[in-house]
Structures are given as C-alpha cells and as structure tokens.
Amino acid sequence: MDRIGQMQHTIERLTRPGRGILAADESYPTITKRLSDFGIESTEESRRFYRSLLATTPGIGETIGGVIFFEETLGQRTDDGLTIPAACESQDIVPGIKVDKGLVELSGSGGEKVTQGLDNLGDRLDGYLEQGALFTKWRNAYAVTDSLPSRQALDANAEVLARYAAIVQSRGMVPIVEPEVLMDGDHDIERCAVVTEAAQAALFQALRRHNVLLEYTVLKPNMVLPGKSHPRPSPEVCAEATLRVLRRTVPAAVPSINFLSGGQTSEEATANLNAINQAEGAKPWVLGFSFSRALQNPVQAAWAGDAQNKAAAQQAFLHRARLNSLARDGRYAA
Ligand code: 13P
C-alpha cells in the first residue's frame, strides 16, 4: 500500500462506529505519578503487566479502535508472549505511539513552554513502524493567565506541531495533533474559549504552511472549560463553548476530533462528550475521545497493583469504554 493508502486505511480503522482512542502513553514520570495515586509502584514489570491488561481486555475492540502507547510498551510482551502491539491487532485495535519528548522552557519567553522532539524524528518513526505503530501523537501544552499564552508561544508551538505532522505523514503514519489548553488556574470558561481558539487557529495555519493533509490528521483538543478553581459548568454549557470554537477553527476536511480529558472526573468527561454529540448544529467531524485519566482512573483503582484484581480491572475498563462509546454517539444517560 502506498503512503496515502496506508493513512486512509488507518483513519478508517480509527473512526469506525462506536470506537474511540485510549491514551496509555504516559512517560516514566507521569505513569509513576498516576500509579502512585493508587499505591502502585511503577516498575518495568508493573508497567508491562498493566498495559498488557489493557490491551488484552476481552471485547475491548468493540469500543476502543486505537491505543496510544509510550515507546517502552511497543517492545514489551503480554503473558502469552505476544508483543503488546500484536495483542492490540489481534483485537483489531490500531497501535499508536507518543513521539514528542516533553516540554522545555521556550527561550526568550517569560517562562512559557514549547514541546521538543523533532530531532531524528523520521528515523525514530521508521523504528516505531517496524514495531507495529501506525499512528502517532504529539502534545503541546498552553498555560492560561489573563495575558498568556503569548503570541510567541502560540506560534512556536504551532510550528513544531505542524512540522511533526508533516514528518509523520511522510512515513504514511497518521498524526494526532494535541494542542492542550490547560485547566490549571482560575480563568473562566470564556477565557478558555479565547485561548483555545487562538491555539487552534495558529495550529491550522501552520499545518497549511507545512502542507499537512488534513484528511489524514486527527485533532486532540481540550474541551472548553473554566479553570479548576471554578465550579463545573453544565455539560450543555461546555458543549456550546467547545463547538463554537471548533466550528471557527477546524476545517471539515479533518475526519475526527478526539478530546483529551484534562483532569476532569470520568463522569464529567463522559457527560460533556455526550452533550457535545447531542448539541444541535453543524458537526462535520467524528467527535470522539482519546482519554487517558478519564478511562484509566477506575481501572487503576480496581487493579491496585494486585494481579488477583486483573479481571475486575478489565471489567472497569470495559464499562468505562462502553459509556464513552455511547457518549461518542450522544446516547449516554448518566
Ligand atoms: P488526559 O485524558 O488524562 O488529559 O490525557 C490525555 C493525554 O493523552 C494527554 O496527552
């Protein structure tokens, strides 16, 4: 299959009815923090056991169409001896890989961040392809204040995200572009809407400059929500603000928008996704999920690091994935 055919096929698999994406791509520091919240030690073996548990959950391929992994996981094996990507494929789930190398200070700014990882990206992708990954993810993060993010941070981050996407498409892989406006802080929902619109507008201009084919690109945005210190808005208010921004910024050529959960509770993320899909008006994209915490928190709580809880943890994963599958079609009832 040629490069375009490969991307087309991957997009079709990622957007099959009822499916969403699981983000299980936490870096070493992040997975250590997530697991320690549930009293679990992060070791090579505990990470292998846990991510195998996710990939081998019976029936999970009905609601999860793709999983994003961290590079360590691509080489790890399930108890049955399959590589974890092969275990995904055996359930018809597309394996993906996070390829950015995290945030560094943006020199010349007042302490803002830019995402690094472009050096040798093409060579790294060739290796990930051999290990079975067919799509990729790169995350930018934008902190919000009354005056930030700056023009410098918006443009620098858009530029690297677009360069990443162009390199990924040169290998016939599908890029997920993730411009995350953070929920930390005391900004209101309208400030989040303004910043999200600015970040996405800069991103789509940069994608165009770099000749990225939008038809084979997935957007992973934040939902539009107030900062954490505010009371939570109703799902309808979140849906209205989120769709208002997306309609202004995201061309209809983009096949799929898969939201991050960003620190929302599992229930909040599912209810908001459901409201977004129930809302009236133009929605020319799949509006799905690519949650990490909102899918995995209940799984990690049920597992608690004890192999005897494996079946219960898989049951928790199936349950949460099913609810999000319903929400992706606006059919979830809280
Ligand atoms: P959350 O859903 O926990 O925000 O994580 C999504 C993600 O992949 C962040 O890069």
Image (cartoon, grey):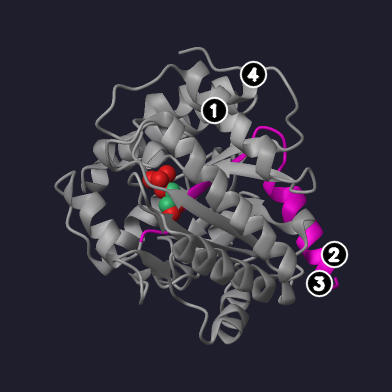
- Residue 279 numbered mark, or none: 4
Q: In this view of the protein, can residue 94 be seen by the observer?
A: no
Q: Which residue is mark 3?
A: 3
Residue at mark 2: C-beta within 8 A of ligand 1:
no
Amino acid type indicated by mark 3 = Arg
- Pick the residue in front: 20 or 256: 256
Q: Secondary structure at mark 3?
A: helix
Where the C terminus falls, by quadrant?
A: top left
Q: What is the number of the mark on residue 241? A: 1
* Crowd class of label 1 (few under 14; some 14 to 19; many from 20; radius 10 Å): some
In the image, taking residue 298 as reference, residue 254 lies left or right, namely right
Mark 4 touching mark 2, by CB under 8 A?
no
Where does residue 175 sit, x and y in percent of width and height?
Answer: 64, 62
Q: Are marks 4 and 3 in contact (CB under 8 Å)?
A: no
User: Is the residue under label 2 in contact with that under label 3 (CB below 8 Å)?
Assistant: yes
In which quarter of the view is residue 104 placed? Answer: bottom left
Label annotation for residue 5:
2
Q: Which residues are magenta?
A: 1-26
Lower position in the chain sequence, tag 1 or tag 3? 3
Q: Is residue 21 left or right of residue 29?
A: right
- Going from N to C along the chain, the mark reached first, 1 or 2, is 2
- 24 magenta-colored: yes
Of circles 1 and 2, the one toward us is: 1
Which quadrant holds residue 249?
Answer: top right
Tell me the amino acid under the disc marked 2: Gly
